[in-house]
Image (tube, rainbow, N blue to C red):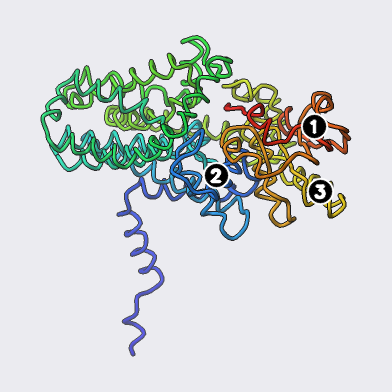
């Protein structure tokens, strides 16, 4: 064979470079975002809510007290071969990357060029609040991509007259309802936006109502479960409202937090997305999206929602605004995007587990970038609530396992392990399997429905309870230790572990008194 006929290294590099140039920019951005998420996914341990979702998913059902079934089932599926934070966060990394691509496609759908798609994709990838939501696998993780997908298909129907798109919107809405009920905050105002704008013509399409039926069929099983169990989800949130645990604050505070959470330099992008459809004819079909943002903001605020409840609306408005800002002169546009990237890089250690706890504590103290608490439970977080709630769970389990196995075998066989909250109980369940711990008991949320599991209360190892309160109902109470690690949440640090022996009333009889839907 003639060696001269083979392509040279230079030629191969040129071919590769040419092929890379043909890859849409949003795919390259998504690849980088996925790599960043995966690079740090296992640096901290499993988050409190993730532990809880894993345990719920190991008890498959059509619903749970405080969430639909999809995320618990997904979380449990990632842990089939043992607890692994990195595998648990794979779906979150995929959601972050997918959001970049979808937001860029959204900009193209609205008539944007490759520059608009690039702007939209970058914004969706670097907005600190969106990064934070996709750092862990929780019910909020998939809201940005689900809300954006719903708006995308609805916009395809409005802009392109594509009737099949409303069917896909229905599928997305139904699946999203099986992950978190919060999409109702987006569907309702978008529906009002459709009604109030020229998009109302799609109301005459039979396909639209078929799509609504699809959404109902896909999403209704968890609602039926809620109804059969007395609507515990509503009870949970009614308790939140009654106790004022969500720090929604004033309208000014709420909007300021939104501005900074999404990166203050990206504000012109989504603000343009709200305003431009009313001022620039090419974007007139997107007016219903602007109404949707305004309506969603009002709904979340009036419902006293947490700050992050509104975060999933912004990628849709990034797409609209990108079409406008792509028209700005390249020099000004590039400087603005570079500035936004710098801001997000400065905030990155606050939303991604880049620094270890001592370094993060020092960074937060120096930079004053710690986010304000959005709920009572976040007050006093040494780091951020997210990262502080990823610390100490394995230490807790090891301590409880040591106490449990120190008991005589006869007593151990009838010993219940009772935790004060679902985070502690879930940590004991997830990490305690290898140490032979029995299923934990807890009165909070889904754990309450699982009951006392047949234990009579003759011996109880209680984690984070009040020994003085239990002395009134037990023959003896022995404090055997306390748990906690540096930088954990205050209510999970220096907390007691005690043994109650001889509960004077059967645990099953008093179980209803332990109920805490919160």
Q: Is residue 36 visible?
A: no
Depth check, front residue: 233 or 172: 233
Q: Is residue 267 left or right of residue 485?
A: left
**N-terminal of the two: label 2 or label 1?**
2
SS category of the residue bearing label 1: loop
**N-terminal of the two: label 3 or label 2?**
2
Position of the C terminus by quadrant: top right
Depth check, front residue: 28 or 303: 303
- Residue that label 2 marks: 56
View extreme (bottom): residue? 1
- Is label 2 or label 1 in front? 1
Residue 109 rendering spot, x and y as whole percentages = 23, 38
- Residue that label 1 marks: 504
Please tell me which residue is depicted at 32% across the width and 37% down the height of the picture.
173
SS category of the residue bearing label 3: helix
Residue 234 rendering spot, x and y as whole percentages = 47, 25
- Is label 3 or label 1 in front? 1
User: Which numbered disc covers residue 71?
Assistant: none
Residue 411 rendering spot, x and y as whole percentages = 83, 49
- Residue that label 3 marks: 404
Q: Is residue 321 above or below residue 246?
A: below
Q: Is residue 6 left or right of residue 499?
A: left
Q: Is residue 193 above or below residue 96?
A: above
Quarter of the image for residue 364 reads: top right
Q: Is residue 69 visible?
A: yes
């Amino acid at each position: 064979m003639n060696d001269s006929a083979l392509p040279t290294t230079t030629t191969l590099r040129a071919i590769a470079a040419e092929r890379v140039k043909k890859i849409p920019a949003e795919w390259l951005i998504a690849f980088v975002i996925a790599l960043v998420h995966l690079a740090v996914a296992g640096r901290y341990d499993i988050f409190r809510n993730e532990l809880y979702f894993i345990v719920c998913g190991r008890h498959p059902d059509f619903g749970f007290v405080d969430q639909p079934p999809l995320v618990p089932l997904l979380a449990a599926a990632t842990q089939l071969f043992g607890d692994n934070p990195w595998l648990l966060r794979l779906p979150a990394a995929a959601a972050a990357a997918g959001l970049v691509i979808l937001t860029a496609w959204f900009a193209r759908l609205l008539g944007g060029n490759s520059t608009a798609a690039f702007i939209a994709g970058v914004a969706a990838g670097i907005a600190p609040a969106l990064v934070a939501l996709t750092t862990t696998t929780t019910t909020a993780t998939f809201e940005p991509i689900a809300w954006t997908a719903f708006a995308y298909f609805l916009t395809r129907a409005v802009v392109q007259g594509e009737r099949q798109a409303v069917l896909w919107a229905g599928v997305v809405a139904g699946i999203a309802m099986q992950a978190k009920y919060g999409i109702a905050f987006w569907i309702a105002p978008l529906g009002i936006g459709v009604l109030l704008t020229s998009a109302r013509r799609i109301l005459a399409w039979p396909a639209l109502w078929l799509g609504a039926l699809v959404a109902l069929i896909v999403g209704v099983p968890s609602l039926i479960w809620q109804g059969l169990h007395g609507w515990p989800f509503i009870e949970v949130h009614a308790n939140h409202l009654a106790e004022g645990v969500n720090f929604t604050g004033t309208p000014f505070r709420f909007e300021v937090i939104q501005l900074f959470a999404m990166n203050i330099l990206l504000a012109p992008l989504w603000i343009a997305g709200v305003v431009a459809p009313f001022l620039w004819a090419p974007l007139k079909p997107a007016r219903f999206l602007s109404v949707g943002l305004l309506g969603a903001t009002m709904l979340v605020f009036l419902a006293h929602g947490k700050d992050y409840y509104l975060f999933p609306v912004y990628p849709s408005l990034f797409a609209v605004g990108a079409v406008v800002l792509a028209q700005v002169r390249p020099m000004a546009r590039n400087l603005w995007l570079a500035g936004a990237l710098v801001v997000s890089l400065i905030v990155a250690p606050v939303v991604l587990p880049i620094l270890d706890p001592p370094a993060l504590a020092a960074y937060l103290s120096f930079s004053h970038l710690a986010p304000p608490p959005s709920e009572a439970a976040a007050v006093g977080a040494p780091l951020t609530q997210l990262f502080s709630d990823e610390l100490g769970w394995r230490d807790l389990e090891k301590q409880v396992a040591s106490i449990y196995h120190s008991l005589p075998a006869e007593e151990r066989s009838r010993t219940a392990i009772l935790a004060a909250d679902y985070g502690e109980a879930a940590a004991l369940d997830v990490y305690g399997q290898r140490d032979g711990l029995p299923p934990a008991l807890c009165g909070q949320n889904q754990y309450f429905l699982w009951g006392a599991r047949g234990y009579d209360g003759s011996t109880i190892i209680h984690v984070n309870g009040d020994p003085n309160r239990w002395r009134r109902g037990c023959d003896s109470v022995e404090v055997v230790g306390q748990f906690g690690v540096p930088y954990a949440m205050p209510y999970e640090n220096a907390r007691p572990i005690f043994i109650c022996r001889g509960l004077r009333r059967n645990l099953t009889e008093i179980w209803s008194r332990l109920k805490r839907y919160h």
